[in-house]
């Protein structure tokens, strides 16, 4: 899969759906040899792009981001032969990533306690919905439930206290949680370099959601009163709000240094007359009269298109940004220039989302194709010592696909 920071490192991705496979994708981006393990019928994540009631898209978009640069092994772990193959794979692996339920791991004898005694250098990366102890250890969950709902994020990010809780987009909790698991794996690799020993690392959607919401959670833990979320036109600070433009687009205004930027903002609006208005003369006055100032800003922002405001606000040094849409992203020159969006190596006309960090002097593996189902099954088995006659038998018996 190319050279990189993790060249020569073998990772077994024995996980499904988004978060844990995302950690393996990051490993692959930096050159690790990642083997994607699937059942013969295919990982459910592979088929999740087929949205009921929608036309079948040209590309398997979820699989592109979830499994790029990985090699595919379709293996039936319900069979004794399949489990023996996995054990041989683990003998050659540096990192094993799994999100199987804990009870399934115990039944298959691939829990950390089962695989670690004979493999002291193996890093066992465990991902769950709710952690590995406690009364809900066996509870199933997805990012919408475990990350967003349970952590308080879904409640806090509603438009206002009277609105319904936020309905998050799929994967928006999973992918940050995957970065967390990646960080744990890399920390364990660093420890292994120092001590020669691997070990278990773990994370969960619940822990990730709490960390994402940690500022508000810590406030509550300290007994700090949390005011109810106000409607947009009743916010406590008109300089930190969203505003609609004439063309229907929105922008997000974020002025924290009002002593320096409130005057320039009024200048951009052509409302220098407000500098003499006692309702807005000081920060304290603006807080007391925030709804009135929001109403004034609403009238000004709605009078011009978003592109007009972008140029004017940028020129004045005002901190803001557009409320982007998916339609904006393919043509976002900043995202391309920084490498946040990059072309697929095998299909350069198609962009993909890059992993969200860089290392100075380290080149990532160009984002290649995600494997077809069982594409590398024979190749992987030959590498761990299987003869062609054995591979043929395994294929005929349905152990591999």
Image (cartoon, grey):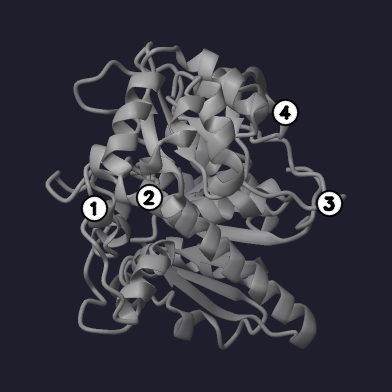
- Per the image, the residue denoted by label 2 is 285
Q: Position of residue 77 (x, y in %)?
A: 39, 60
Q: Nearer the viewer, mark 3 or mark 4?
A: 4
Residue nearer the viewer, 202 or 297: 297
Q: Secondary structure at mark 3?
A: loop
> Residue at point 38% right, 11% down?
247
Rendered view: 199 above or below 365: below
Q: Nearer the viewer, mark 1 or mark 2?
A: 2
- Per the image, the residue denoted by label 1 is 229
Residue nearer the viewer, 167 or 365: 167
Q: Residues within 10 Å of mark 3 (few under 14, many from 20)?
A: few
Whole-angstrom CA distance, mark 3 to mark 1, is 41 Å
Q: Position of residue 11 (x, y in %)?
A: 62, 60
Q: Secondary structure at mark 1?
A: loop
Which numbered tag is attached to residue 337?
4
Q: Residues within 10 Å of mark 2 (few under 14, many from 20)?
A: few
The answer to whether residue 69 of the structure is visible from this angle is: yes
- Direction from residue 241 to residue 63 in the image, left or right: right
Which numbered tag is attached to residue 360?
3
> Residue at point 53% right, 42% down?
67
N-terminal label among 3 and 1: 1
N-terminal label among 2 and 4: 2
């Amino acid at each position: 899969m190319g050279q990189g920071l993790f060249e020569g490192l073998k990772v077994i991705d024995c996980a499904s759906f988004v978060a844990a496979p995302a950690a393996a994708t990051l490993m692959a981006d930096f050159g690790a040899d990642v083997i994607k393990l699937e059942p013969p019928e295919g990982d459910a994540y592979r088929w999740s792009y087929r949205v009921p009631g929608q036309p079948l898209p040209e590309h398997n978009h979820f699989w592109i981001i979830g499994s790029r640069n990985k090699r595919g092994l379709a293996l039936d772990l319900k069979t004794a032969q399949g489990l023996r193959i996995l054990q041989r794979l683990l003998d050659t692996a540096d990192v094993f990533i799994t999100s199987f339920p804990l009870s399934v791991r115990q039944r298959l004898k691939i829990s950390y306690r089962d695989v670690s005694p004979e493999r002291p250098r193996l890093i066992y990366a465990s991902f769950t919905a709710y952690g590995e102890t406690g009364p809900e250890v066996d509870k199933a969950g997805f990012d919408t439930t475990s990350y967003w709902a349970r952590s308080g994020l879904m409640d806090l990010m509603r438009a206002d206290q009277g609105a319904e809780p936020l309905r998050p987009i799929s994967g928006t909790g999973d992918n940050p949680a995957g970065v967390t698991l990646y960080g744990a794996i890399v920390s364990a690799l660093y420890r292994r370099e120092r001590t020669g020993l691997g070990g278990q690392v773990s994370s969960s959607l619940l822990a990730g959601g709490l960390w994402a919401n940690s500022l508000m959670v810590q406030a509550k833990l300290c007994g700090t009163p949390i005011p109810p979320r106000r409607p947009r036109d009743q916010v406590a600070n008109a300089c930190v709000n969203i505003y609609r433009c004439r063309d229907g687009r929105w922008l997000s205004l974020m002025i924290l240094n009002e002593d320096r930027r409130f005057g320039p903002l009024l200048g951009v609006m052509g409302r220098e007359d407000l500098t003499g208005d006692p309702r807005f003369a000081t920060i304290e006055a603006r807080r007391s009269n925030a709804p009135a100032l929001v109403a004034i800003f609403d009238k000004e922002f709605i009078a011009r298109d978003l592109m007009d405001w972008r140029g004017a606000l940028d020129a004045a040094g005002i901190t803001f940004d557009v409320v982007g849409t998916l339609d904006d992203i393919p043509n976002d020159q900043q995202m391309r220039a920084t490498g946040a969006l990059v072309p697929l190596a095998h299909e350069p006309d198609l962009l993909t989302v890059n992993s969200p960090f860089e290392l100075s002097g380290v080149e990532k593996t160009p984002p290649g194709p995600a494997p077809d189902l069982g594409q590398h099954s024979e190749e992987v088995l030959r590498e761990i010592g299987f003869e062609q006659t054995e591979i043929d038998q395994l294929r005929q018996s349905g152990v591999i696909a």
